[in-house]
Amino acid sequence: MTVSEILSASSRRVIMALGVAAMLCATSGVRAQDAAKPADKPDQLKFDYDGPMVLIYQIKPDRAADFEALWIGLRAGLAKSDDADLKAFGETLYPYKVEGASVYVFRLDSPSKKFTYDPIKMIYEHVNYDKPEKGLFTRAEADALYNKFNGAQEGIAAWKLKKVGG
């Protein structure tokens, strides 16, 4: 008798999600970025890799709606950019939710080498404090988005992928 014959589809999904979450916690080398992070530390969410990657966020179950709203707001702000590269980058920022878990995955077929995947940096780097109307976010919008992310995540992992079998 196999596991698939014993467990329902939803039970198998929960077990798979728990396995992904456990691997995420065990192998995560990238941790939450603080808005006040010293400038001398390298940005662990800015990649210099030519192959595909997955970026995995483990989120507290009660904060999933906040996390999803963060990315909607972030994409909306980046869409206002006059910079075609930044606008195109914003269009790639769609998380996939793992069914039955508070785990989100970003599929990065060709990760940006120019922009960070740190949502806090993405937000605050595009606030124009001198001329708020010229920024992609006002300070109030940036703070509201930050509050959606602050304390919501439990872990981040970035996995480089290598094609096999052909």
Image: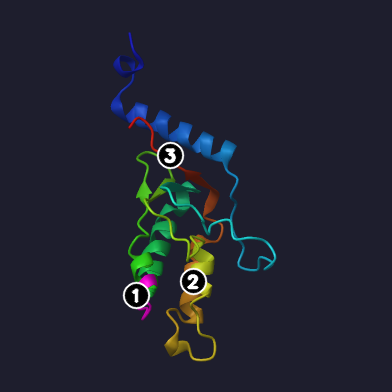
Q: In the drawing, does residue 30 fall left or right of residue 103?
A: right
Which disc number belongs to residue 123? 2
- Any part of residue 24 in sight: yes
Residue 82 painted magenta: yes
What amino acid type is highlighted by mark number 3? Lys
**What amino acid type is highlighted by mark number 2?**
Ile
Q: Which residue is mark 3?
A: 162
The magenta span reads: 80-85
Q: Is residue 143 visible?
A: no
Residue 23 rendering spot, x and y as whole percentages: 52, 35
Prevailing secondary structure of the magenta residues: loop
Q: Which mark is residue 84?
A: 1
The answer to whether the residue labelled 3 contacts the one labelled 2, judged by CB atoms less than 8 Å apart, is no
Give the spatial CA distance, label 1 vs label 2: 17 Å
Q: Taking 39 as reference, is 24 above or below it?
A: above
The local crowd at label 1, few if under 14, some if 14 to 19, many if 20 or more residues have their Cα within 10 Å, is few
Nearest to N terminus: mark 3 or mark 2: 2
Q: Quadrant of the N terminus?
A: top left
Q: Residue at x 55, y 61 (%)?
A: 150
- Viewer-side residue, 81 vs 119: 81
